[in-house]
Image: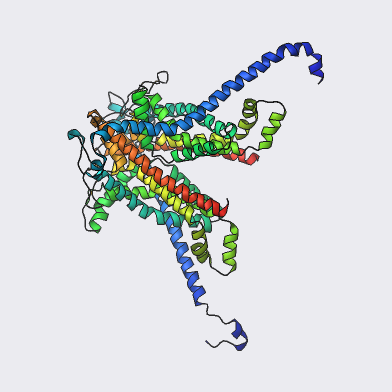
């Protein structure tokens, strides 16, 4: 109070200038923040528009139905049939989810319901580290370990033949990659359940296993289902592991032990020298658009399911 | 059974309870087994990589450019090489530059967008639509961001297969995650602090800069570092943008439109070589990549723990 009256004449001269500067900074900072905010919104449109615009050449040259159902992929003679890659992608996704989902749910139940204290910390940090490992590393270890295992042991044991590279190899590795991701989502939805549920069930004399089976799994069901859908999206869009381990064959695989191609691995494997062939870039970017749409459908489904769960338990 | 008469009233058929207990134990066993799959996979993975890289990871490997010949990487041959040993140096430097530039872009765009959404935008339908879009973007496969980077930065903007195009692509890739995590950190700052700041006559920006950000910075930093550690290992987008498969000098930070090498790309290239010894070299590269990645994670965890304790 004293200081303002003491230096009254001085402050009056300063004030407009200081206020101006403050307001200028205020305006500049708001430009930056609004700009960044708008960019985040635009990013969504940017991705869709870019992919659509770059896909137009291929879609206008070839009929969509023909491309999706033709099994002939040969950019050099302008044949763009996606069917082998689509079949390969479905094979890989279904196989790795069939292996990964039970493991992920059981491990999540152990972490959320059984593990306690230090054990829980150790186990969850192992899972976190596994989730943080880049996929190129899984690819290399797959080459060194899983490829000989499939080629020399698994395929002969099942009475078939495999060069080691192929759909089964990719699926085994992808199952390990997608598991930690699904575990953490499932643990989250189990731990979000109110403790009253557990206490009520144990109180009427149910054993722990009965509580998990009949109460907790049912209550967390939508959350677990959304974790599985997100897992599907993950495997579907995985690129590097299929590119390294699937063998790069653009023919429809006859058995899971065959080499093949997935949609994302098609992009990586045919990128490069083939890009000079007209329409190839457009054909590969169209694959990207397909991936985007399908993964969004998975994510959207997961979001709807999760929202139902949230409304039910109010967390 | 010939139980004494006084306990008759309590005589129950406990075989169903015993059966449930037995199922419960089997179930716990199955859960433990499933958990072990992940743990064993991680241990096997690390063991295998270290085993492969043993003897190949040397100081020279860190400080020399790559070579086309596997013999050049073998420490036994270092003595009589006219060209010098082979290594990962340009890719290591390239990855660090790439992540540094990505960090700058992420701060400007990601943190800015989160501040806008949390502090400026009202809670209306549009904001919720934007937020739904952002969480949807987080699930987009990285290869799609690679295609976007190729079409947009490499071709349309004309940045070419450059450090700049790579960093911008990686920025787009982690932007959704950074925005969501920054928003969470901002949301954790109590509203009373903002009101107290406004009460003293501070402007919106002054409040954000002097009150909200200092409080939220540990959470924001943790989110950014963890996202960057994801970006440094991403291979697919880097391939699409066109990282060099073999670069003999580190990229030049003063010329961001020059070509660049990056560790994941280098490892991918080595792993594709048919010659067996390249697997050892790729494994040595992986140890370098993992070390950088784990260091970044450790910093993030340190920041989180340090500031958690204060509260």
Instruction: Give the vertical position of B160 relative to A309 (above or below).
Output: above
Report x, y in % for residue B170: 42, 31
Give the number of callouts: 0
Q: In screen coordinates, is B247 left or right of A115?
A: left
Scheme by which the image is coloured: rainbow
Instruction: Give the vertical position of A54 relative to B21 (above or below).
Output: above
Q: In screen coordinates, is A11 left or right of A24?
A: right
- Snapshot quadrant of residue A49: top left
Quick one: quadrant of the C terminus of chain B? Answer: top right
Q: Residue at x 67, y 17 (%)?
A: A19
Report x, y in % for residue B94: 39, 27
Q: Can residue A101 be seen in this view?
A: yes
Q: Residue at x 27, y 23 (%)?
A: B82
Question: Toward the viewer: B152 or A269?
Answer: B152
Q: Can residue B45 be seen in this view?
A: no
Question: Toward the viewer: A38 or B87?
Answer: A38
Report x, y in % for residue B114: 54, 33
Q: Which residue is drawn at 28% across and 30% down?
A: B72
Question: Toward the viewer: A120 or B152?
Answer: B152
Among all residues in the image, which is located at the extreme left?
Answer: A77
Report x, y in % for residue A131: 44, 45
Question: Toward the viewer: A238 or A157?
Answer: A238
Instruction: Give the vertical position of B98 relative to A226 (above or below).
Output: above
Q: In screen coordinates, is B169 left or right of A285?
A: right
């Amino acid at each position: 109070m004293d200081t303002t009256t003491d230096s009254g004449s001085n402050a009056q001269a300063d004030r407009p200038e200081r206020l101006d500067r403050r307001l200028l900074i205020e305006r500049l900072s708001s430009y930056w923040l609004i700009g960044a905010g708008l960019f985040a919104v635009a990013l969504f449109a940017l991705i869709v528009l870019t992919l659509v615009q770059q896909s137009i050449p291929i879609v206008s040259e070839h009929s969509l139905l023909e491309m999706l159902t033709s099994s002939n992929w040969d950019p050099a003679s302008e044949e763009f049939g996606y069917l082998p890659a689509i079949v390969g992608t479905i094979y890989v996704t279904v196989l790795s989810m069939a292996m990964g989902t039970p493991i992920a749910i059981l491990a999540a139940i152990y972490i959320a319901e059984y593990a306690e204290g230090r054990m829980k910390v150790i186990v969850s940090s192992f899972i976190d580290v596994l989730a943080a490992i880049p996929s190129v590393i899984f690819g290399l270890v797959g080459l060194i370990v899983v490829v000989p295992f499939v080629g020399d042991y698994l395929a002969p044991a099942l009475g078939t033949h495999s060069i080691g590279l192929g759909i089964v190899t990719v699926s085994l590795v992808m199952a390990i990659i997608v598991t930690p991701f699904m575990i953490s989502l499932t643990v989250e939805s189990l731990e979000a359940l109110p403790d009253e549920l557990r206490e009520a069930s144990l109180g009427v004399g149910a054993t722990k296993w009965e509580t998990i089976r009949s109460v907790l799994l049912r209550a967390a069901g939508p959350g677990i289902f959304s974790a599985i859908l997100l897992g599907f999206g993950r495997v579907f869009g995985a690129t590097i592991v299929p590119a390294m381990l699937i063998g790069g064959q653009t023919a429809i695989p006859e058995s899971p032990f065959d080499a093949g191609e997935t949609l994302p691995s098609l992009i990586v494997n045919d990128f490069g020298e083939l890009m000079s062939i007209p329409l190839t870039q457009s054909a590969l970017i169209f694959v990207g658009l397909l991936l985007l749409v399908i993964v969004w459908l998975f994510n959207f489904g997961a979001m709807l399911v999760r929202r139902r769960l949230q409304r039910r338990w109010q967390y | 059974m010939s139980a004494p008469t006084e306990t008759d009233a309590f005589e129950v058929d406990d075989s169903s309870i015993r059966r449930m207990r037995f199922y419960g134990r089997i179930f716990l066993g199955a859960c433990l087994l499933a958990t072990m799959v992940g743990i064993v996979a991680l241990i096997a993975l690390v063991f295998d990589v270290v085993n492969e890289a043993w003897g190949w990871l040397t100081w020279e490997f860190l400080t020399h450019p790559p070579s086309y010949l596997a013999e050049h990487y073998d420490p036994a041959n270092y003595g009589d090489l006219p060209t010098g040993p082979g290594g990962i140096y340009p890719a290591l430097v390239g990855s660090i530059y790439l992540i540094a530039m990505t960090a700058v872009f992420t701060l400007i765009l990601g943190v800015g967008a989160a501040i806008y959404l949390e502090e400026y935008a009202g809670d209306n339908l549009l904001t919720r639509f934007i937020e739904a879009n952002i969480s949807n973007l987080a699930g987009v496969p990285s290869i799609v961001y690679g295609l976007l980077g190729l079409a947009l930065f490499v071709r349309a903007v004309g940045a070419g297969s450059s450090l700049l195009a790579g960093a911008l692509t990686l920025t787009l890739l982690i932007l959704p995650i950074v925005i969501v995590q920054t928003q969470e950190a901002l949301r954790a700052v109590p509203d009373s602090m903002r009101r107290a700041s406004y009460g003293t006559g501070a402007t919106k920006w002054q409040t954000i800069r002097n009150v909200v950000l200092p409080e939220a910075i540990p959470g924001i930093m943790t989110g950014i570092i963890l996202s960057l550690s994801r970006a440094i290992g991403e291979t697919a987008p880097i391939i699409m943008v066109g990282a060099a498969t073999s670069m003999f000098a580190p990229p030049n930070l003063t010329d961001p439109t020059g070509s660049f090498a990056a560790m994941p790309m280098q490892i991918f290239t080595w792993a594709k070589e048919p010659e067996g010894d390249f697997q050892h070299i790729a494994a040595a590269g992986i140890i370098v990549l993992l070390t950088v990645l784990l260091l970044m994670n450790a910093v993030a965890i340190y920041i989180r723990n340090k500031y958690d304790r204060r509260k």
